[in-house]
Amino acid sequence: MSGQRGPSTSRSKDRPAEQARTRPSDGSPNTSAGAITGRAPAPAAHRAAGSETYPVQSPTDPTRRAFLTGAGAIAAGLAVYSGAVARHEIDETHHTVSLPSLGSGFHGLRITQISDIHLDEYTEPFFLERVVARVNGLAPDLVLLTGDFVTRGSLTFVAANHAAGRCAEILSTLRCPSSLAILGNHDVTVGSALVTGALGSRGIPVLRNTFVDLTRGGDSLTIAGTADPGTDIPDLALSIPERPRGPVLLMTHAPDYADVVLAHPRGLNVQFILAGHSHGGQIRLPVLGPLVLPPGGRKYVQGPYTLGHIHLYVNRGIGTVGLPFRLNCPPEISTFTLQPA
């Protein structure tokens, strides 16, 4: 019974045992201090004589102290692992996506997605450089960047211009025929013009409620992008062409917005959606799953989903927010190879 005493180890009030007076032989009362006699209370850690005894466990008991020390060491080890190791363990995922009406010119096209970089808080420039090197090793035909290049936080507000510029500088070393981007909620809050300008100056166009047509040998593939659903005003009538000449791939930062796309009249023209935002939960505990999910990323958290005629993929992102930790949720570079349905 750790931390508890036996039934006789505590009393609300100590009371002497029954007292007896003695009289001297002449019969007169004895008022001396020594005339009052009594029985000392039983030791606090034991029952009365003849009863069962219960030793009191000290709060500094070696077994308890060892347990607390071990638990603290495990927690510290997990923090070090999730912050220094797991946060930098890049997971490359590869997927084949079948799209109706995909022309032969785009059969085998390789698209690589990077999302949620969050440079400076807490993603280090060296880690983004490592990500870019891995992407270059994949030799994609197209790189799509689905938002949150910087972080809305104290460090970024102090040096937002530097963070956006440095992020765009590193991304400019991507070796692929084309790169396209959309903004995320952190980018909009820090400053849409700032982030858009930094990326544009390095040759990376930002799509906000607009689209571009890629052509190969007479075949067409439309890449569309919406404004961030959480901090801006997306307009699907502008983002998605009314009469596309081929499949439409839509980038939107918040994955739960896919339900809006599916219900919109122009959503019939979309076959594939790429999103980020959720970080996959960032910290995922066994059985319990993700600890925290952001608004707009609570229904579709990570990986592939099929929503009617639309394929949705939610990338776990590169960076972190809140805490510089990842657990059971590694940063992700996702690559998609297109083929006709």
Image (tube, rainbow, N blue to C red):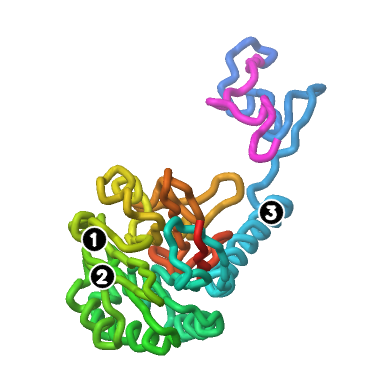
The front one of 264 and 200 is: 264
Residue 14 located within the stretch drawn in magenta: yes
Q: Are marks 3 and 1 in contact (CB under 8 Å)?
A: no
Query: What is the secondary structure assignment of the residue under circle 1?
Result: helix
Q: Residue at x 52, y 64 (%)?
A: 339
Q: Which residue is mark 3?
A: 67
Of labels 1 and 2, the one closer to you: 1
Amino acid identity at mark 1: Ser
Q: Which residue is mark 1?
A: 239
Q: Residue at x 42, y 47 (%)?
A: 309
Instruction: Name which of mark 2 and mark 3 comes first in the sequence.
Output: 3
In the picture shown, does residue 263 fall above or below 133?
above
Of labels 2 and 3, the one closer to you: 2
Q: Which residue is mark 2?
A: 207
- Tell me residue 104's x, y (percent): 48, 69
| CA–CA distance in space, label 3 to label 1 | 58 Å
Q: Which residues are magenta?
A: 1-23
